[in-house]
Amino acid sequence: MYLNGEHLNWCSKLKTLGGSMYRVVFLLMFALALSGCESEPRDFVVGRVVAVEGTLPKLLQSSGALFGNESVKLGDGTLILQIQAENEIYFVEVKKIFYMRDGGQKTVNNIFKKIESGASNIRFPRIYYSEGVKNHLCSAENLCVVDPDLIFFIG
């Protein structure tokens, strides 16, 4: 087909239009993916551990099994930290949280041992974003439940 002496190849015009449209769609999807990938903790509390309380992991009662073989189950220990941060006091329960994507190297026990050995300045988030979901780790009353992998020692 010719218009004003030019050959119009509709297929090539559609390919050009489609190619730029694919680029625009790709860039928009890439930008959305980057904005949804935020998994870094924000809004940190920085403070000093002033008190530590907790219990050791304990044996739970096992149900009897056939032939006298019993399974041993351990209950989780607890660790509660009292944190003095600026003009506020936070009470932090340290425990594994279900929405953490993958388990890290920190546990309740090794956090306790690190504090027991003298480390007292820590940092932890009030809010944690996981897979695009905003999770509040602290209530308005400064009562917090924090995964051990989100506790960072300072100094």
Image: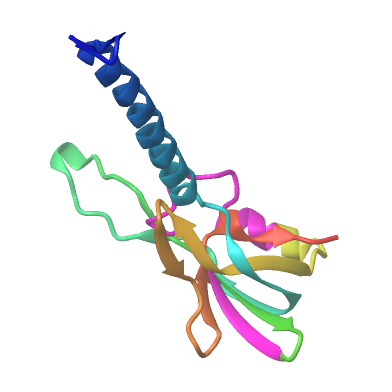
In the image, 64 versus 80, the foreground residue is 80
The furthest residue to the front: 4
Quadrant of residue 25 within the rendered picture: top left
Q: Residue at x 75, y 65 (%)?
A: 116
Quarter occupied by the C terminus: bottom right
In the image, 118 versus 97, the foreground residue is 97
Q: Can you give x and y, in whole percent of width and height, for residue 121 in the image?
A: 78, 69
In the image, 13 versus 144, the foreground residue is 13
Quadrant of residue 108 within the rendered picture: bottom right
Q: Please indicate, yes or no, whether residue 96 appears anywhere in the rendered image.
A: no
- Does residue 97 belong to the magenta stretch? yes
Query: Left of 19 or right of it: where is 91?
Result: right
Q: Is residue 80 above or below residue 33?
A: below
Q: Can you give x and y, in whole percent of width and height, for residue 44 in the image?
A: 65, 69
Q: Can you give x and y, in whole percent of width and height, for residue 117 in the image?
A: 80, 61
Q: Please indicate, yes or no, whether residue 39 appears anywhere in the rendered image.
A: yes
Q: Residue at x 42, y 65 (%)?
A: 134
The furthest residue to the right: 155
Quarter occupied by the N terminus: top left
In the image, 69 versus 58, the foreground residue is 58
Quadrant of residue 83 within the rendered picture: bottom right
The furthest residue to the left: 66
Q: Residue at x 38, y 39 (%)?
A: 29
Query: Left of 23 or right of it: where is 70?
Result: left
Query: Left of 92 or right of it: where is 15?
Result: left
- Does residue 28 belong to the magenta stretch? no
Q: Which residues are magenta?
A: 88-113
Q: Residue at x 33, y 31 (%)?
A: 21
Q: Can you give x and y, in whole percent of width and height, for residue 149 in the image?
A: 58, 53
**Total labels drawn:** 0
